[in-house]
Amino acid sequence: MEFAELIKTPRVDGVVLHRPFMPTVEGTLCLTGHHLILSSRQDTTEELWLLHANIDSTEKRFVGSLGTIIVKCKDLRVIQLDIPGMEECLNIASSIEALSTLDSVSLMYPFFYRPLFEVIEDGWQSFVPEESFKDLESMTDEWRLSEVNKDFSLCPSYPSLLTVPKDIDDESLCKAASFRHGGRFPVLSYYHKKNAMVMMRAAQPLTGTNGRRCKEDEKLINATLCAGKRGYIIDTRTIAVAQQAKARGGGFEQEANYPQWRRIHKAIERSNVLQDSLIKLVEACNDQSHSMDRWLSKLEASNWQSNVKEILTTACLAAQCIDREGASVLVHGTEGTDSTLQVTSLAQIILDPACRTIRGFEALIEREWLQAGHPFQQRCAQSAYSNGKPRSEAPVFLLFLDCVWQILRQFPCSFQFNENLLIMLFEHAYASQFGTFLGNCVAERGKLQLSQKTVSLWSWVNRPQELERFLNPLYEPNNLVIWPSVAPQSLLLWEGVFLRWNRSTKCLDEAYQEMVHIIEYNKELQNKVNSLRRQLAQLETEDKMVADLK
Amino acid sequence: MEHIRTPKVENVRMIDRLTRRKSSVGTLYLSSTHTIFVENSEARKETWVLHSLIYNVERLPTNSSGSPLIIRCKNFHVYRLLIPQEKDCLDVLASLTRLSRPERYGELFCFSFNPNLDKELREKAWGFINLKAEFSRMGIPCNLWHVTAANHEYRLCDTYPSELFVPKSASPAVIVGSAKFRSRGRLPVLSYFHRDTSASICRSSQPLTGFSARSSDDEQMLQAIMKSNPVSEFMYVVDTRPKLNAMANRAAGKGYENEDHYTNIKLQFIGIENIHVMRNSQQKLIDVGELAAPSMSDFLWGLENSGWLKHIKAVLDAGVFIAKAVAEDGVSVLVHCSDGWDRTAQACSVASVLLDPYYRTIKGLMVLIEKDWVSFGHKFSHRYAHLDGDPKEVSPVMDQFLECVWQLMQQFPCAFEFNERFLIQLHTHIYSCQNGNFIGNCQKERRDLRLQERTHSLWPHLWENRAEYTNPLYRTDHSQTQGVLKPLTTAYCFKFWKGMYGRAEKSVASHQSPADCLNAVREESQQLEEELSSHQERLVQLKERKISGERKKTNKLSERVQRPIPTESELSSPLDYFTAPRSEKNTPSFTLPLQLAAPHKNGDPDDLSTCSDFESGVADLSSYSSSGGDDTKDPDSDEVVKANA
């Protein structure tokens, strides 16, 4: 096996593991091709199993012959390993370094992972575009499924099947694709059943400095408007950024060419800025010596909460246009693979109760992120501890999850799932035994043969044993559109992720258990009462019959 | 009555700052105790504003639509009125200004407040909290501590209670001598006794050391306190002031204990700032809450700049230090600041909440407030401006204590019997002057005012409504309920108390609280339990009757209980998420939270979404130019946030 040569020392005894707010563990450290394992060989203490892929960066230092490796993980945890022996320590450090930075996707753990559970429902088949199109067909006949991108040549980052207006033929789609960045022509993102309004997404139009136009593109999006109605184009960039894009061949829709559309610019940051924001935030959260002033000023300087507010505000705006104004909406930024997806997916959570169920939320992630071509592989290659120059890493998906958490916190009874599901998705997007988040688009996943060679995250999550952990006990299904508050005091720091390793959660966990207990007791009582009612009713009928006979 | 210049003004507009078009027109009535706004709408919705809760009234320049008047309350509610005639506005302003600043105790609301209780019940109500019983709960008196009559008729210290608990070993001469050496005679006395370790928390004011003075009586007093804890070899003296402040006091003949003069004491400064700093800090915090449309940066910067959370942390840190000394090290602590009625009360009561689970119950918190605050002479009437007086005496000391408890509730969700609502209710009543409990500045003053004969006690009233104030997660046998709380006081553990300070605007009110859902579930469970036992009884009856063959009229099964889950629809409505418009007339509006039952204009039966008034639900889109490209100005982040205005 090729990993063997990367593992210079497979095993060291007498290693001490330090984790904040947890007792230290002494035991044997083992390195395998994909895991760092620390075992105390005692039943009482838990072992540490850490995926190499989860390691964001390492630091080593020496005091005499005692070496210390600080391991910083993509899930934001920081652990310390004290390793006796300088040579062992150096070997372990360089092995971890090599194993956690493997270049080739096909060497990643998902290709080696064999599930210990029986796959009942194959997650790779759980959310296919044909199925969601069937749902759409039951509501409207205005749309068709186009195979124009069957071989991914028109748009490499789109899936092979796309939902487009029925009246637009594939030839027009090809022309529209050539007018949009990366070939990402406008496609259907969401159909609002209540008033038949739609949300579409795309990449920026390639107007350039001389104001190019494309009749097919105009026709395509106009086809989604009702007679006499106007639509809204939500550009996730500021007007200045959009203007600058012209110089590089991009741009935005000129009102002269799109008279039926009104354009609104918002200010969601570009991905490289977001990465910087994450790094600053995590740095602030990890320093427990900060005075109150310093903490608040670092929190502010990180801009993370501002980013959350901006993304959520834009999503609410899109939802408002659809639900309140009765208008169709087109959302795009530059590439249409980051801020665009944040907005379209959050808007659906606000508008569509189905997206607030576990199944619906999974479908949403599959539809609006995985199949829509969010480059997970690139964005999640490194997390907050990356010390190299960022290439294309960015916490775009994490910000989306943070926004979902904000809505969930404001509407604690409207979601079938709880915070654990969001945290789990964050972890698996960055490092996982499952193949779901590998690759950058449908085409790449196909080439990697992920559906044959790896297990889908959904195969695991949707097992009843696992689902239990993700269910929100307070859930009461409702059909409402939920409008979150975006005022600064309504948006909190997501402690479940950012302070997760910096405090003991015992008391909060207990509170959660207590909540579950209260609700379960209630259900139990309901069942008992119902069964007694039935018995009583039966007895009383018999009673009556006897009496009538007399 | 003589202060009411105009009892009634018609066609007044009540404005929600965020939702201009949601404002309602109605009639304003001024009574001697309340200002009442009655909407002209069919519902005749009434808004009552208690005059004693009014913090200030501000009149803005008259404009074409009328004279705006802003009423700010001490519990952080804000009411914005638009009065058509300037003269009426001036009259209302003058009336409210006078009515909200009573000059004599006799004018206070508590003397006219009449909940229709007969005399006997009222007297019984005043006995609801009994401090003697509280000390005996702690195990006092005992062989080490006893009650002294030294302050009978308040002759030793007029701001202390008449009954004081002191070490048995302290002779009357030592007690008197110690009182003479302490600012305002506030000698060291027992506040809390920790049975498990025999360590105690005592409190006093600063000693009158100046640069060199000493008092052998005071030294003996501290020695007696230390000795009352047989196992420990030293005691802490916690001076809750910043050391610099304590040193400065020496110039005025006051100061702090010299460690060389007292045997086996360890002096510890905590650094809680004085009442003036706290007053300014809270004002800045309130200003943050009132910002028109803060960006996240504005908000966080304002929060930092106010220093408020820093001060809350200091108070909590003081409590943590004392609790640790008493519970873990078994060392007694003497706590003082300058006069020993503000920071000392905060530090002692926070420590008590951490140490003793009893103070984390509804009744226990009442007892604690009665003991550490009311009886020990916290100057309620001065601090909370019950009367028109020196504004420099006003300070949110109690607000900070309540907030410390709230911050603890965030870390220990199962540890407290009461909920946030209880704290907010307490806060309101500390300011409202509805009951006699918090009137005056010390026990003697309350006695002289004969408050127990002339006013009603708050505590039994809160106790009767305790169901409303109960934390559903609290269980007496839960591990968090037992023992000492050890909170983390890292900066990131402190949160902005939105329930308290975010109340100025309805539109940012929290949507739904899990606690309310859980309370509803628990209520339903209780009903189900009752139903269960009644069904079981009936079942037994029926079975018996079946045997005896007897027939009785059958009862209809009771209706299924419906859980009164508060729906989110009642509380949510779309805010405005559009980019900021540039002129005033384009200001986007917000909707008020509306009842689900309100009829929809469109009458679409399928429309279950949350807002019933479409016109006001969203911004006026026609005011947005689609020609963003031609705009010279950027809708950059600063502007974007204004959309929430």
Image (spheres, rainbow, N blue to C red):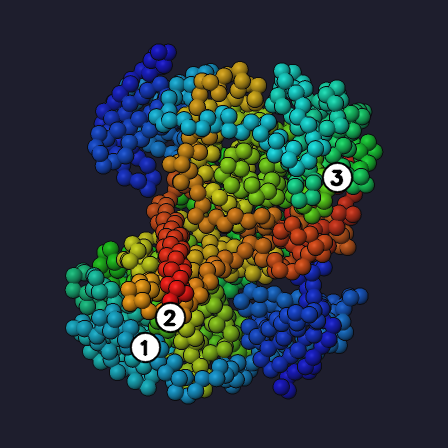
Position of B242 with respect to A321 (left or right) is left
B597 is higher (above) or lower (below) than A335:
below
The residue sitting at the right extreme is A256
Q: Who's the residue at 75% across and 19% down the image?
A: A171
A335 is higher (above) or lower (below) than B450:
above
> Which numbered dot is residue B552?
2
Across and down, in percent, residue B361 comes to 35, 65
Q: Is residue B401 visible?
A: no
Instruction: Estimate how packed mark 3 is, as few (under 14), some (14 to 19) or many (20 or more) residues with alpha carbons within 10 Å.
Output: many
> Which numbered dot is residue B130?
1
Which one is in front, A243 or A490?
A490
Position of B641 with respect to A261 (left or right) is left
Which one is in front, B396 or A496?
A496
Please name which of the two marks, 3 or 1, marks the residue nearer to the observer. 3
Which one is in front, B434 or B267?
B434
Mark 1 residue type: Asn
Instruction: Estimate how packed mark 1 is, as few (under 14), some (14 to 19) or many (20 or more) residues with alpha carbons within 10 Å.
Output: few
